Amino acid sequence: MKFTYGWLQQHLDTDATLDTILEGLTRIGLEVEGVENPGEKLAAFRVARVLTAERHPQADKLQVLSVDAGDGPLQVVCGAPNARAGLVGVFGMPGATVPANGMVLKVAAIRGVESNGMMCSTRELELGEDHDGIIELPDDAPVGTPFPAYAGLDDPVIDVSVTPNRQDCMGVRGIARDLAAAGYGTLKPLAVPVVAGEGDGPDVRVEDADGCPAFYAQAVRGLTNGESPDWMRKRLNAIGQKPISTLVDITNYVMFDLGRPLHVYDMAKLTGGLVARKAVAGESVVALNGKSYTLGGGETVIADDAGVHDIGGIMGGEHSGVSETTTDVLIECAYFTPEAIARTGQKLALTSDARTRFERGVDPAFLDQGLAIATDYVLQLCGGTASGVTRAGSPPVEPRIVTHQPARVATLGGLDVAEDRQRDILERLGFTVGDGWQVTVPSWRRDIDGTADLVEEVIRIEGLDKVPSTPLDRPAGVAVPTATAEQKLERRIRRAAAARGLAEAITWSFIAEEEAAPFGGGAWEVVNPIANDMRIMRPSLLPGLLSAAARNLKRGASSVKLFEIGRRYLADAERMTLGMVFAGERSPRGWRASKAQGFDAFDAKGELLALLEAAGAPVGNLQVMEAPGDVYHPGQSATLRLGPKTVLASFGVLHPTIAKAFDLPAGTVAAELYLDALPAKRGGGAMRGAYAPPALQAVTRDFAFVVADDVAGDQLVRAVRGADKAAIVDARLFDVFAGPGVEPGHKSLAIEVTLQPGAKSFTDAELKAISDKIVAAATKIGGSLRA
Amino acid sequence: MTPDLDQLRADLLAAIDASAGVDALEAVRVHALGKQGAITGLLKTLGALSPEERQTVAPGIHALREAVTNAIGARKADLEAKALAAKLASERVDLTLPVDRPAPGGVHPVSQVMDELAEIFADLGFAVATGPEIEDDWHNFTALNIPETHPARAMHDTFYAQRRSPQGEETASAAGAAQAASDDGGSATGAPERYVLRTHTSPVQIRTMMAQKPPIRIIAPGRVYRSDSDATHTPMFHQIEGLVIDRGIHMGHLKWTLETFLKAYFERDDIVLRLRPSYFPFTEPSAEVDIGYTLEKGRRVVGGDPAKGNGGWMEVLGSGMVHPKVIAACGLDPNEWQGFAFGTGVDRLAMLKYGMDDLRPFFDGDLRWLKHYGFSALDVPTLSGGVTA
């Protein structure tokens, strides 16, 4: 909401400086977003008269002027075609900066003739587009006056952010009222003219009392619509409103001055009376913005016998809008129901200054005054004769009464304010304080409906800065963890991954449809995405990470190890997941290993096991199973499961088609760890079981078994480990061999078994027995001891 | 005899000294002390002598044997040391050659800041709460006193979400989908629920108040979404919400909590806050909070009082006393329970503290940026070490 300091002073009697007012506005909740003095950049320009104009001796298109800018004649070279003796215009003194191009004027010779400044065009001063010639002011413009003062451009423009609850401050008067309440001056009385109307009011009626409870109207006939007066145009210009014609400017001015939207119809374009009714589906209207709107039915509209003329309370129609030839007008001053306005506005995606005000709730008790003020402006500025006033329907003016509890200002607001002072503040804001703190809410404050609101009014005006800081009590007793087990797990995993050399990325939650497709397509989509490639809520963390990896490789990174911890958005839940991607080189070429090494699926497996171990998962019990999905290389990918159903992680080399789709080299490796699938850590407190390291040294024995190619290494290791659970504490596969000496279609797997004796060392017979059990277990799964 | 021994000793010691290697030395040893050796031969002669003669001759021979044995031992140690030194000298490597240094990895600044905040608020007794990001309209708006027709809705630039058609859906089990569908009826109106990407973390207030009894002290960090994009706005960003519900909580407590938290976060005692009356549908009274900054070398540095010049105010927080209607919507009695809530941008807090000036790279995954602004895994924020890593 923009207004000027001078405009504010029309309502507020104050001797406060501009700075004090600005500080006060922010202090009471009308945040100042900016203040601009349009005259500042024009301070060095003056009103000046051209005394004489002669042809330039060296140039046909130039003239040599003698200009009086208040200090006697100055010689000025000028190229404007309209420069002539007697013209009064705007003169830039040497030293002035031309706003449009930043040029600093100085005394200079132009084609051999000295020039002491410049007569300016409208465009040069950024006052408009005209550049056909220099500005021509009226003959009586006072020569020597600084131009901003003459043009009324020395009035600072203040821009405040008005919160949606404060429609009363969507007009200058409301802002003045708030400032007055806070002690920044006195609110001047509002002069409401008495308009003597002749005859009946215009034919208007209300059929849709829900959407438009009140429709007041008055006609003015025999008027002339021209250009609005200078003072009005200046104010509208100052706040960024383009003056259009007197009638339109009056409606805008009253709206910004008093927060009261109005509409003016050209009666010559109307057929019969006007009615506020619900739209019928399919009706359409061309609004004043030139766009055609087809109504879905039910919107409140203003229509005549021929059709819809106005999207009620939002925007008028082009057909019945006023023009230069308008002579008879109908002035509408109506009350539209905020909820109905909001629904229609949202549906049509149509915003306007009127909608902004109506949907926040204009003062329902200000219809008569608003109409009288508008009609009076019309009569004074356009002439004509006013009719009587028609009042169709009635606005919701029943006063709201809220019980105030003065003690709540301290117990909720945290500030002790004496009861007398509270009463004073509320009354200054327009509330009426009755017996027992029964507070009547002023008609313009639709936002107040409870004690908490009144508490806010009191501390807002008294000053939030006065509220003393009050420490919260510390909870008694032992400090308890404030993070849940899931949160601790997430933090732990994050730092474990970072410690292992992966960089944490955060990627968008939404991805492109084609990126989501290989990962199941996604269960959720954004209806109104900001871009089409940000439409699907990701079903996997991998697409985002793969794209990030590809970007990094394109930027020249040789090795990319990224991870992210975030949610996958599935049909039934949002699941916390860790995603990883390994692209490029695991290790660069170097003098030790010579060739660069790429990543393989075992890198992902290694990271996953390390992270699972950090998470406290039973890593020894995990099973490696195939088929993690189509996005991976079918022969180089797997899942890690706890039991056959609980998938903790999937990993592998990406399927070449997926790698290609993401612009990544073949051999890129990825993995996902499903944090919410991890078994919860068992409780049991800080105390651990008793433990003493075994007294006797463990012994190791090596075995090599020949098995068929399709027997998984892990299967053999498990079989061996399970052969004697008391003695065998570890079995580690350390060699895989196929070739000479091993039957084709088979491979030799070498396993180091660690045996832990208990109280006594193993005897040879015991070792033989264990060895036999191991061989038997391997034989059971088709293995034979290698000769 | 005596002159012979002296000559022999001189000859042998000279030969030991002259032996250039272990093998030559061994030859000298055999020549002197071997079975056929000179000294061994002399010792053998002692048996034939009378005891008197033996007493005269033997000490000389024994002394000779000992001297030669010692000389050989010393020479051997000397030769071995030289040989080892020569071997080691030949094994010299160029240790200026580079070693592989795996990339260090790191924690994203947003995660780091969230950990910092959790640590600060843990000390004040605030637990960490979470909620869904695909949120229903009721929790995101209606329960927060933002009805359908409220003008504040337009200010939120809301993303709307919907379930995809089942044919595009392969991951969810039929049972899961059916379960989720039955949850859709959870709105107060009973109408089919509309979903949004939560526009703020405030719905976690609602979920917390509905799930647990007061007193409540929580923070709720997480991703939020708004349809907006420029240098300081991205369609996805992070917020942190704070909520205290108890008896007798007022704006003074809010002010103290914000001051305490911001001082701890920025680790500066000269943090100055300015509370401005404002409006949020879910708080009453409401306040926006500005933090004072000082200009240092053209950069805005948080801290210092703008009233003393060379600085200004930056908006960092929205806050207020939880609206009685919100408390009631969660099934609590607003006459008994009251409290405050606040919300701020985590990314913005990170930018203010660590000096990023553009939000967009936060979500790009550029390793160069992550290396520059990321944190070591070992930089766990702690109160004892100062939350700043």
Image (tube, coloured by chain):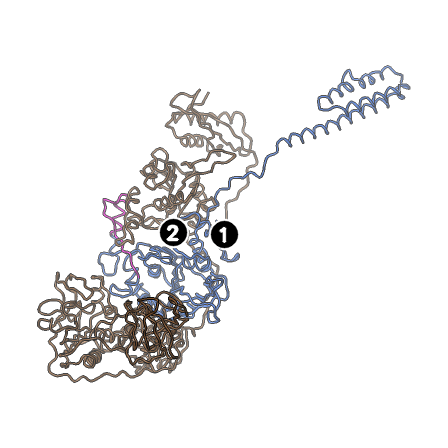
Chain colours: A brown, B blue
Instruction: Read off the chain for label 1.
Output: B
Residue B379, label in figure: 1
Magenta segment: B156-181
Q: Amino acid at mark 2?
A: Phe
Name above or below for residue B280 compared with residue B184: below
Residue B363, label in figure: 2
Q: Earlier in the sequence, mark 1 or mark 2?
A: 2
Q: In this orientation, does residue A149 appear? A: yes
Place of residue A320 in the rendered image (x, y in percent of width and height, measured from the top left): 14, 70
Q: Secondary structure at mark 2?
A: helix
Place of residue A728 in the rendered image (x, y in percent of width and height, measured from the top left): 48, 32
Alpha carbon distance from label 1 to label 2: 21 Å
As for residue B171 lying within the magenta part, the answer is: yes
Q: Nearer the viewer, residue A544 or A471?
A: A544
Q: Are marks 1 and 2 on the same chain?
A: yes
Q: Secondary structure at mark 1?
A: loop
